[in-house]
Amino acid sequence: VAAGLAAAGVTVAALVESAAPKALLRRAPVWAAHPAKLAEGAGYAAALLRHRVPVLTRHTVVEAHGTGRLEAVTVAALDAGGHVRPGTARRVPCATLAIGHGMLPQTDLADTLGCRLDGLAVHVDTEQRTDVPGVWAAGEATGIGGAGLSLAEGHIAGRSAAARLHGTRPDPAAWARAARARDRGRAFAAALDTVYAPPAHWTEQVTDDTTVCRCEEVTAGAVREAVADLGAGDVRTVKLLTRAGMGWCQGRMCAPAVAGLAGCALTPSHRPFARPVPLGVLARQPDHRDDMSHPTGKETG
């Protein structure tokens, strides 16, 4: 994201990374098996260097400042245990702050169909079949791993589905190359998860007045009160007591933070896969009948 913004002409004040470079070195054998990924990473590093973007490793953002809009953030260094090191805080002027600690699989559709989940991802066998007959799953619903992994899984799922829907037993040799790519992709993703995990004590930096659920304007203090004073022990109970997760996003954005503050495991939320689509989005879709009448495919209206 930082490299892309810099390439687009944005002045990036800093890239703040909580992981330590040593964590990357400890996974050297895994990186060595993915030269394309190494080249991609080197390209990003070169772009950041070319655009003079400061990179602060083993740091985190601890506070945002501004009235009406963001004006600056405070960043600080982390020790080996994930605690903020006293005396290292500094203020960085900026207009935009983007924060991410990884991604989560989107399993709404599979869960609605009754598919089994392994943790937060859809469970599949070696053919990418779920435990629901006639349902295959591939891509990031089965675990975040990037486009290459998704393509490998999709190749396997497609061949398996084509064979079984025609009443024949699929031959694993037909997707042996994709299976090897899938195994390598999953190993790479697992290594990234361990290296780029959120700081161990990140909840300590969240003040009670911090808004956790933006839809319902629930603060971290309200979540902590639900746990300490009202006995909530899981995300669902916190939701019932505080309304965290009852708003527009149905917990898709705030559930991980709520679980972390409550000190409980993040479990999949059972919600319908359908989502509201604004009329404006539909109105901007091109009329394919018009496309057919214009050789250039230019949108009319």
Image (cartoon, helix red, strand yellow):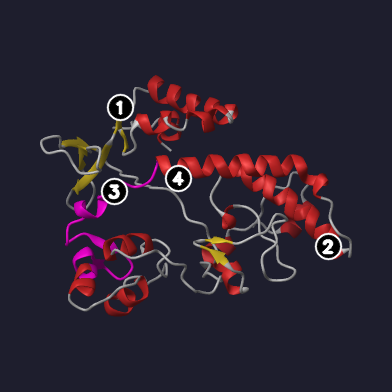
Q: Secondary structure at mark 2?
A: helix
Left or right: residue 93 versus residue 97 is left
The residue tagged 2 is 164
29 in the magenta segment: no
Q: Is residue 212 magenta?
A: yes
- Disc 4, SS: helix
Quarter that holds the C terminus: bottom right
For badge 2, the amino acid type reads Arg
Separation (CA) of disc 4 from disc 2: 34 Å
Q: Which residue is the site of mark 4? A: 193
Residue 95 vs residue 205, the one in the foreground: 205
Q: Earlier in the sequence, mark 3 or mark 2?
A: 2
Classify residue 232 as left or right of residue 290: left
Closer to the observer: label 3 or label 1?
3
Residue type at mark 3 is Ala
**Helix or strand or loop: what does disc 1 sit on?**
loop
Give the residue pinned by disc 3: 200
- Using residue 195 as the reference point, say whether residue 145 is left or right of it: right
Q: Which residues are magenta?
A: 196-223
In this figure, which residue is indicated by the disc labeled 1?
54
| For marks 1 and 4 on the same chain, the one whose residue lies earlier in the sequence | 1
Residue 167 in view, yes or no:
yes
* Between discs 4 and 2, the one toward the N terminus: 2
> Which numbered disc flags the more N-terminal residue, 2 or 1?
1
